Image: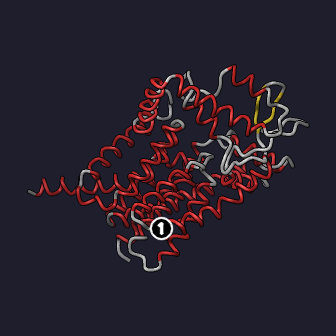
Amino acid sequence: MNFKSLILPSTIFIALLLRLYFLFYQTNIHTINYYEYGAIAENIHNGNGYSLFYYNNDKLEIGSYENIAPYKSAFMPPGYTFIVYLFYFLNDLETRNYLILIFQILLSLLVVFVIYLLTKEIFNFTSALIAAAVAAALPEFIYTSCLPGTTIFFHLGIVIILLLLYRLKYTVNSKIYLVQIGIAFGILILFRSEVIFLLLLVLIYLSTKRQFKQIMIIALTSFIIIIPWGIRNFLVFNEFIPLTTSAGLNFYRGHNPYAIGVWADEEIVEKLIQFKADPNFEFQMNELYLQKGFENIIKDPFQELKYVFTKLFHLWIFNPQDKRTTSIYYIVPWFVILGLLIISLNNSNNWPGRNYLYLFLLYFHIVVILFFCLPRYQTMMKIMIIPFASEGLRLLINRIIKKNWI
């Protein structure tokens, strides 16, 4: 066994140690909040079914309250909710929280391994090792692995999808890869509904290459995975809700007259109260938020234009109002990664491997402009930037070595 063969296993082991340290010494296991996912999981266990919101007098809350049955829900997609629900069979809070986060840590180690494979596919062995090291040690990736949410699942799903897409170029039996891509897309959409936009972009890209057979296989396989959730929603709400009822709220938060991220105003609160007796409360809420969001776009298009630049600044630089993104442990690594990305993109030899990066970045721009930018969106976007930034670091080191040698 040579030294090179030990680098990747050692990197993954270091990633494990860093995450376990953060979990046991930097995470308050007793104050972990699973928000909507936990509320739905708890409601299922309490016999209320897949439900979320309820009114406590005139205050809208999530979970359940005494003998009040919460409204049926499609607010959160079922993927991560199902994961949390499985662990809710454990009554001990501390044990449950540790096991959920350890499960996420193990998935994050798999992310390190797959991003190594992806980077090696696009570039070379050296860049792949650098990418694995970055994914293993990046502070926000360590933090995210010990935080409830879908980011780790998004990272894993994306690197798997992109690895399979890149391998399509030279596979003899591509049908297997196409089915796997469709399955991965379908599952990931059940964790993050907005991934449907990335699927559409990939299908459009394949259509420009007239690869209609590939389009049919990927689209059909994804549809088969997603359709049971859509059927459930139709049966429960008697309305067409293919993915989620949270799109309206997120749309309004990105297109309201006050500031990006605002949840509601008094007018919306009063109108929502009028739906208290409606069993389809979430559907009505979603429609109201969509209506208000479109009204604001039409009413003040100049403000919407300013919002676009603000959202993109939050995506590519940082959100100055959020303490997490102004941390030195967050912002310094990000600017280094951006600089290395630019070096990589300026290398003319990398053009063949950029197509899916551009699609991925276009997808994020669509999501951010259509809705708004949370700090985790930048963290999610970095998973595809890291392979290219790692190649940028390799190129930079090579230039420095050659310059000093000469």
Callout 1: SS: helix
Depth order, front residue of 386/309: 309
Q: Residues within 10 Å of mark 1 (few under 14, many from 20)?
A: some
Q: Is residue 288 visible?
A: yes
Dividing the image into 4 quarters, which one contains the N terminus? bottom left
Three-letter code, disc 1: Phe
Could you tell me which residue is drawn at 51 percent across and 55 percent down? 200
Is 177 placed left or right of 390 in the picture? right
Could you tell me which residue is drawn at 76 percent across and 36 percent down? 62
Figure check: 334 above or below 181: above
Q: Position of residue 299 (x, y in %)?
A: 54, 23
Q: Position of residue 300 (x, y in %)?
A: 50, 22
Is 127 placed left or right of 295 in the picture? left
Residue found at the far left of this picture: 406
Could you tell me which residue is drawn at 44 percent across and 68 percent down? 211
Q: Is residue 137 visible?
A: no
Dividing the image into 4 quarters, which one contains the C terminus? bottom left
Number of numbered discs: 1
Color style of the picture: secondary structure
> What residue is shown with label 1?
212
Residue found at the far top of this picture: 266
Q: Position of residue 227 (x, y in %)?
A: 68, 59
Depth order, front residue of 273/134: 273
Q: Position of residue 58 (x, y in %)?
A: 81, 24
